[in-house]
Amino acid sequence: MSALSHKIDFAIIFSVKHANPNGDPLNGNRPRTDYDGFGEVTDVCLKRKIRDRLQTAGSSIFVQSDEKKTDGMPSLKHRAEAEAPIGLGKNAFKPSAENTKDKIAKRACEQWLDVRSFGQVFAFGKEADAAGVSIAIRGPVTIQSAFSVEPVSITSTQITKSVNGEGDGTKKGSDTMGMKHRVDSAIYVAYGAMTPQLADKTGFSDADADSIKAILPKLFEGDESSARPAGSMAVKKVIWWQHNSKAGQYSSANVHDLLLKLIDSWKEDNNEDKNLLNQIDNLKPDSESSKKLEIGNLKPEIIDGF
């Protein structure tokens, strides 16, 4: 399978309504914000959702979440040993004189889509033949944290939690107090890129890029929870710029800046989220707004959310 043949830049525009898109465990699980009050969803959180959607679509994923495991493996070490290439056994991902770092990295990239996409660090224990060894794989797919286009309003609600006491369960334990937090209404934007130079090293292909492209419009499907009720988070648009070469016609910074300027122009005309959402919904191929996302002969593909 040939590696990625074109540089790709992309952006994801998504809405949040009465949900906690990414709680901060160091701040009482309140929705993450920066110092200026803009909402944030970390790149780690977004990559977790991408992995989950790819896994649901049938791709082989190395870093699986506990609640979505499909193989029952208790750790990454056990998964690596269980999914070792046939004939190589559990030592396929263990360094040795014959098993060089390059061989291990190549096998891992061939085995798991998320490894050849995002990269991975394989750290080894203190065995005599592996002391101090770690293998770092640098992936071609990068995603930035998503930030809201306006400062977010956060509502905090006090709740009570009831549990059964110890013993036979007939005696109710004391109620305890807790808090739930939500973002009332906001629009977030995340930017990403796919770099062919790094794809050459991991084997990330055009087909892999298409797999990620296919799941981005439905990034939050199957991600429902108490903090994120069904329908409370939705991808509105995916903007996909495919360059005409591996080097690309323009830098990612210049390409991403096109959407930033377009959103700023919308904000100047509309001060209400509803109007801004209408502008996003009306962002269609060949529309006046879509032309502002073109630079030279680089035109974007605009994909509606699922």
Image (cartoon, grey):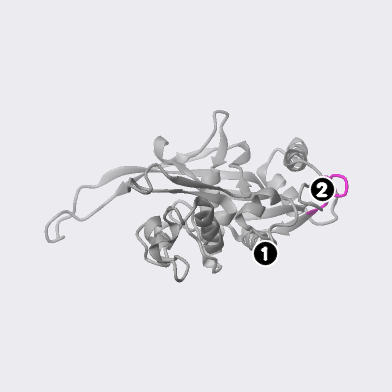
What kind of residue is marked 2? Ser
Give x and y (percent) for residue 138.
57, 47
Look at 70% across and 57% down and name the residue there. Answer: 4
Residue at image position (60%, 60%) is 218
Label 2 to label 1: alpha-carbon separation: 29 Å
Residue 255 at x, y percent in the picture: 76, 43
Image quadrant for the C terminus?
Answer: bottom right
Residue projecting furthest to the top = 35
Q: Is 124 or 102 nearer to us in this picture?
A: 102
Residue at far front of view: 97
- Residue drawn at (70%, 51%) of the image: 196
Q: Pick the residue in front: 189 or 5.
A: 5
Task: Tell me the tag on residue 113.
Answer: none
What is the secondary structure assignment of the residue under circle 2?
Answer: helix
281 to the left or right of 139: right
What residue is pinned by disc 2?
Answer: 289
Q: Position of residue 282 (x, y in %)?
A: 77, 53
Above or below, 110 against 176 in this view is: below
Question: Residue 5 sits in which quadrant?
Answer: bottom right
Q: Is residue 51 visible?
A: no
Tell me the residue at 55%/50% (across/down): 119
The stretch in magenta equals: 291-300
Disc 1 secondary structure class: helix
In which quadrant of the rendered view does residue 50 lie? bottom right
Where's the N terminus, which quadrant?
bottom right
The amino acid type of the residue labelled 1 equals: Ala
Residue 187, compared with residue 218, is above or below; it is above
Residue furthest to the bottom in view is 86
Residue at which label 1 appears: 207
Residue 202: x %, y % from top left: 60, 55
